[in-house]
Amino acid sequence: MFKTTSAPQDALILKLVPIVTQACEILRAEYQAYCAGETFAVQKKSDHSPVTQADYRVNEFITQALQEKFPQLPVLSEEGDNAARKHWQSFWLLDPLDGTKEFLHKRPEFTINLSLVDGAKTTFAILAVPGEQMIYICPQQGLPLKFEIPTQQWWVYTEHQLSTKVHIGLSQSSQAQPLYVEYLNILKRDVEVVALKAGSAYKFCMMLEGKVDIYPRFHPTCEWDTSAGQCLIERIGGGLVDFKGRPFLYNQRDSLLNGGFIAFRNIELKKLAFLALAQMSHLPEI
């Protein structure tokens, strides 16, 4: 949850919010054009995942804006050239449209993910939700902030009372998959569970708003899918860890593909999540 606050004076935030606000407007316009049935370019990548003209347009805008404002920092983007990334100590990590499948299914649960990685850890993050005209920010110090684009109102994260029910965030297709079914059934032995389906990194925003408590992921993501969300959730006392309890690190491996993970809003929820995980018959090796 969030409460209203005054505008921050943080120089990094003040540089980035106009860029991300404009990127949100670009993506909203692309989404409206697609929903209106206008001619819209959609392609398949080598892994058969979809990529659209919206992905490329937002990527070009943000990448160029970042290079102008921060010429010393390279950009590692889902839609960019990452050949030199192993030589980078600090860099921007970008997914210009996280949730392309949601976009194509006309569900506004897609995000712009932008984070600053220093060494192996994320030190600053932005998750923007163009469909809601909302930007979530994890500053380099302090609690997460939220910026409402139409009203220019700022909000700061505040703790809220936990529900007696445990809300589990799932991807749109996951609830029918055996691993997720098993995990939910194990959780239901001890607590009342509410399963909520939502797309992409939008589930991290739901965690910040107190709508999702635990987000299990048993099928692959990439580093640009998790970095910003992990930074935001860690800052409120939660986390995102692999099945051995280790926080994700970034740009440390040959592959940018992540293994499975558990995201949680606080330590008590982590304990609950891992108790259920320990009782599963098997876990995927991803």
Image (cartoon, helix red, strand yellow):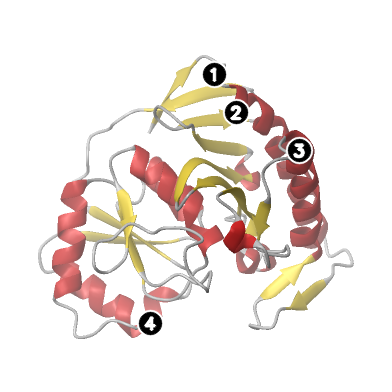
Mark 1 and 2 residues: CB-CB less than 8 Å, in contact?
Answer: yes
**Residue at the image point whose x is 47% and y is 63% from the top:** 252
Q: Residues within 10 Å of mark 3 (few under 14, many from 20)?
A: some
Q: Residues within 10 Å of mark 4 (few under 14, many from 20)?
A: few
Q: Residue furthest left?
A: 190
Which label number is shown at residue 177? 4
Q: Residues within 10 Å of mark 1 (few under 14, many from 20)?
A: few
> Which amino acid is tagged 4?
Gln
> Which amino acid is tagged 3?
Gln
The residue that mark 1 highlights is 8
The residue that mark 3 highlights is 22
> In the rendered structure, which disc, 4 or 3, sits on the residue that comes first in sequence?
3
> Which amino acid is tagged 1?
Pro
Question: Taking 247 as reference, is 180 above or below it?
Answer: below
Rendered-image quadrant of the N terminus: top left
Q: CA distance from mark 4 to mark 3?
A: 38 Å
The residue that mark 2 highlights is 13
> In the rendered structure, which disc, 3 or 1, sits on the residue that comes first in sequence?
1
Q: CA distance from mark 1 to mark 4?
A: 43 Å
Label 3: element kind: helix
Residue 273 at x, y percent in the picture: 21, 62
